[in-house]
């Protein structure tokens, strides 16, 4: 069993698959803390977790046909240690809701496939400059990452990001060896992972073994034939993965973390329901507003943003937590609560999933809707 050496996981994580291990925490836990505890952070693995010891670990960087090698100690000693707060989200977060329109191919995820953490390590831009990479080199277009996790044919997990993002110190791409101030746990990429803030989880390559400075994107399955969006009418007979760009920056999203759908709520004395949730946008865009309604949009209220990083857009990488007491019309026995967020570019979420449906169930960011019963 190639998964026999996988780490132990927190019992609260709800698996959507066990081999490979994929799991998300209960949504209510997410809204409890601005920094998601490491053992409750969602896990998205495509392959077995590699068994790496710190002393055998090396990061290899290939640049113009030459290989450069860095030990973990080199990464710690040779470069400034930078700490950023960034949310990481899977492109498949909230896929389960899109599936209700029409089936899609992919893990049946809920709305907790996102977490917010602090990440520490050297800037990728510093490491690249150290080996002689020049910002204005026209031959360089993409930075490819390879994981140390491999499939049965020995092919590693891989992805790439645009060179512009990688080489810009303000892009804040980090080769992280710490998460929330502790060494990275095995499930999250021990000993080193790429953290590419504002960019889809899939490019935040864990167990980073190799970087290739290149003129082309990664040829990995996950860069070329997965993690792309399509027109809702494209199906598995007509799909041409070459026609869509790989997802990089993610669109704006939000979710109600409590109450849960289906719960029975006792109203507050002022006839309101207390809601809590998260909101986030890719590309360093900040959340400027979260709108909530309890009457299908006749009346919208703006939630209080309770927790937010102080970094300004377009380098606002962390998520926002929000809460609100929404007034509910008297005599209501069942109520549907909707939430939508607005980011600093005034992008907002689509109203329904119908017209953003895609065959992989990615970018699933329509209004979040939770139906609850009101206790008599
Ligand atoms: N890196 C490697 N090496 N192998 C993987 O399977 N999964 C990716 C990314 N990096 C993956 C990887 C995907 S799709 C996501 S969403 C994030 O890691 C999940 O990060 P997490 O498990 O730390 O939450
Ligand atoms: Mo993902």
Image (cartoon, rainbow, N blue to C red):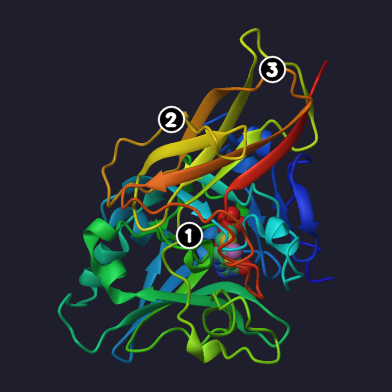
Provide residue 38's location: percent of width, then percent of height. 59, 42
For mark 1, give the secondary structure.
loop
The quadrant of the picture showing ligand 1 is bottom right
Q: Which mark is residue 192?
A: 1
Can residue 35 be seen? no
From the viewer's perspective, is residue 219 above or below residue 6?
A: below
Provide residue 13's location: percent of width, then percent of height. 74, 45
Front in this rendered view, residue 264 or 293:
293
Q: Which of marks 1 and 2 precedes in the sequence? A: 1
Which quarter of the figure is the N terminus placed in? bottom right
Residue at x 69% of width, y 39% of height = 370
The answer to which image quadrant residue 261 occupies is top right
For mark 3, give the secondary structure.
loop
Q: Which of marks 2 and 3 precedes in the sequence? A: 2
Residue at x 36% of width, y 36% of height = 309
Q: In the image, 66: left or right of 72?
A: left
Residue at x 62% of width, y 52% of height = 113
Q: CA distance from mark 1 to mark 3?
A: 54 Å
- Disc 2 and disc 1 in contact, CB within 8 angstroms: no
Residue position for label 2: 307
Q: Which of marks 3 and 1 precedes in the sequence? A: 1
For mark 2, give the secondary structure.
strand
Provide residue 56's location: percent of width, then percent of height. 53, 66
Q: CA distance from mark 3 to mark 2?
A: 31 Å
Q: Residues within 10 Å of mark 2 (few under 14, many from 20)?
A: some
Of marks 2 and 1, the one in the foreground: 2
Q: Residues within 10 Å of mark 1 (few under 14, many from 20)?
A: many
Can residue 357 be seen? yes
Residue position for label 3: 330
């Amino acid at each position: 069993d190639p998964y026999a050496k996988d780490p132990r996981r927190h019992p609260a994580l709800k698996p959507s698959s066990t081999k490979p291990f994929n799991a998300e925490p209960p949504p209510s836990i997410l809204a409890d803390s601005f920094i998601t505890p490491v053992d409750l952070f969602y896990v998205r693995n495509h392959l077995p977790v590699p068994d790496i010891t710190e002393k055998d670990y090396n990061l290899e960087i290939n640049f113009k046909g030459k290989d450069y090698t860095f030990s973990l100690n080199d990464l710690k000693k040779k470069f400034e240690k930078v700490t950023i707060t960034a949310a990481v989200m899977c492109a498949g977060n909230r896929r389960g809701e899109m599936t209700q329109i029409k089936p899609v191919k992919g893990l049946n995820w809920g709305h907790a496939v996102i977490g917010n953490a602090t990440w520490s390590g050297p800037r990728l831009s510093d490491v690249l400059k150290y080996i002689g990479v020049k910002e204005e080199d026209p031959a360089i277009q993409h930075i490819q990452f390879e994981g140390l996790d491999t499939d049965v044919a020995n092919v590693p997990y891989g992805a790439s990001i645009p060179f512009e993002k990688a080489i810009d110190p303000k892009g804040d791409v980090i080769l992280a060896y710490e998460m929330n101030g502790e060494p990275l746990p095995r499930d999250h990429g021990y000993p080193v992972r790429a953290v590419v803030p504002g960019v889809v989880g899939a490019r935040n390559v864990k167990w980073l073994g190799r970087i290739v400075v290149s003129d082309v994107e990664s040829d990995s399955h996950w860069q070329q034939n997965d993690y792309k969006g399509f027109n809702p009418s494209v199906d598995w007979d007509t799909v041409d993965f070459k026609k869509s760009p790989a997802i990089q920056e993610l669109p704006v999203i939000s979710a109600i973390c409590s109450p849960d759908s289906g719960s029975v709520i006792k109203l507050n004395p002022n006839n309101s329901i207390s809601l809590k949730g998260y909101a986030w946008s890719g590309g360093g865009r900040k959340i400027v507003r979260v709108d909530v309604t309890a009457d299908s949009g006749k009346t919208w209220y703006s939630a209080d943003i309770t927790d937010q990083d102080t970094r300004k857009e377009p380098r606002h990488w962390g998520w926002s937590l929000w809460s609100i007491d929404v007034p509910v019309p008297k005599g209501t026995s069942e109520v549907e609560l909707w939430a939508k967020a607005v980011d600093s570019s005034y992008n907002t979420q689509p109203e329904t999933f119908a017209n953003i449906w895609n065959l992989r169930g990615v970018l699933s960011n329509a209004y979040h809707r939770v139906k609850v019963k009101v206790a008599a």
